[in-house]
Amino acid sequence: MASAPMLSVEWRRSSYSTNGGNCVEIGVGIPHTVPVRDSKNPAGPILTASPTSWTVFVAFAKAAAV
């Protein structure tokens, strides 16, 4: 069960998502936390990361995709 702060989060998908929406979503609106979930299972588990960790992960993923 999601905690109360996660219930009010606004979820966004990447504009690069082209595979029918099967991707991860990130939540916005929670200070100092980046929640991440599977778009196919929105009621499922939520991974949380610090903004710094998320930025490093995204930079790594972009570099690996080239």
Image (tube, grey):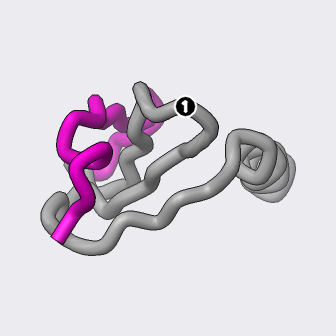
Q: Position of residue 45 (x, y in %)?
A: 30, 73
Q: Quadrant of residue 44?
A: bottom left
In this rendering, the answer to whether 35 lies above or below 45 is above
At mark 1, the secondary structure is loop
Q: Position of residue 25 (x, y in %)?
A: 37, 47
In this rendering, the answer to whether 29 lies above or below 45 is above
Q: Give the labeled residue for mark 1.
A: 31
Which residue: 83% across, 54% down?
60
**Foreground residue among 13 and 64:** 13
Which residue: 34% across, 32% down?
12
**Number of numbered labels in the structure image:** 1
Residue 51 belongs to magenta span? no
Residue range in magenta is 1-19
Residue 30 appears left or right of 42? right
Residue 42 appears left or right of 35? left
Residue 63 appears left or right of 1? right
Residue 19 appears left or right of 31? left
